[in-house]
Image: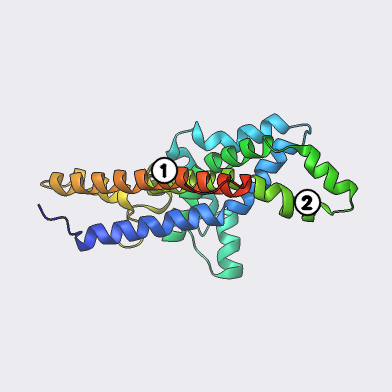
């Protein structure tokens, strides 16, 4: 059996990794901010804000893709402004695929970071505040290191989710080889093509292997970070 990847498989894999990396890391600051708002503040509409953030988990991905297409196309409210001011177009490009993947993975990242934030002893932050530390310094020197395991977990979960994104991506940016055809879209194309079953199986195994490796890396990295924070030696 030939284990070497074909040019099409390499192209789909590299594009998937590129999209997933951009989707997870570019949305990280927003995820940290959203998690902090959910964990540390209470205001009218808090429940609605929480529900809106988690909406991509419960609505059909095609709906998310359609909303993105309407909003970020060259004639959409956001897309027209971005194209006129910055010359950036998201529809039918890998950038749009990254946006679609980020939106679908965002709730998982927020959830992981929020759970980590809720375990932080706020007494430590309050003590630093009484000693004159600013809110920014408290967050950067106390809160951020303590929630690092949650950030790492959220990043890897979002990365794995972005790798498998299909419905929102194909609706928003179509299925263009070399531009938007990620692993799931390439797999879909092969399934629809006569005689493509064997290559589809290879792509399916490749997608599962990459996602499994990402999840295992999440667990290993989270454990390493916890050991560093707790001051225990690595095994």
Dot 2: what SS? Answer: helix
Q: Is residue 25 above or below residue 212?
A: below
Location of residue 211 (image quadrant): top left
Report which residue position mark 1 lands on.
215
Q: Is residue 226 above or below residue 26?
A: above
Q: Badge 1: few (under 14), some or many (20 or more) residues near its Cα, within 10 Å? A: some
Dot 1: what SS? Answer: helix
Report which residue position mark 2 lands on.
138
Residue found 51% across the figure and 37% down from its top: 56
Disc 1 to disc 2, C-alpha distance: 31 Å
Residue found 45% across the figure and 34% down from its top: 60
Q: Are marks 1 and 2 in contact (CB under 8 Å)?
A: no
Sequence order check, earlier mark of 1 and 2: 2
Residue 140 is left or right of residue 156, and the answer is: right
Residue 221 is left or right of residue 37, and the answer is: left
Image spot of residue 9 (x, y percent): 24, 57
Location of residue 16 (image quadrant): bottom left
């Amino acid at each position: 059996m030939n284990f070497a990847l074909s040019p099409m498989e390499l192209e789909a894999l590299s594009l998937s990794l590129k999209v997933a990396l951009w989707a997870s890391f570019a949305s990280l600051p927003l995820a940290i901010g959203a998690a902090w708002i959910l964990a540390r503040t209470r205001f009218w509409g808090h429940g609605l804000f929480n529900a809106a953030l988690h909406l991509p988990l419960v609505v059909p991905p095609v709906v998310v893709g359609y909303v993105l297409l309407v909003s970020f196309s060259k004639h959409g409210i956001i897309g027209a402004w971005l194209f006129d001011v910055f010359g950036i177009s998201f529809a039918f490009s890998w950038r749009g695929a990254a946006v679609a993947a980020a939106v679908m993975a965002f709730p998982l990242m927020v959830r992981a970071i929020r759970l980590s934030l809720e375990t932080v002893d706020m007494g430590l932050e309050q003590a630093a505040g009484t000693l004159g530390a600013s809110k920014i310094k408290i967050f950067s020197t106390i809160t951020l290191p303590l929630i690092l395991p949650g950030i790492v977990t959220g990043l890897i979960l979002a990365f794995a989710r972005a790798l498998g994104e299909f419905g929102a991506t194909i609706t928003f940016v179509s299925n263009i080889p070399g531009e938007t055809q990620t692993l799931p879209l390439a797999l879909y194309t092969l399934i629809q093509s006569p005689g493509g079953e064997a290559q589809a199986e290879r792509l399916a195994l490749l997608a599962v292997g990459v996602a499994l490796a990402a999840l295992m890396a999440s667990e290993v990295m989270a454990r390493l970070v916890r050991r560093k924070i707790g001051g225990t030696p690595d095994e």
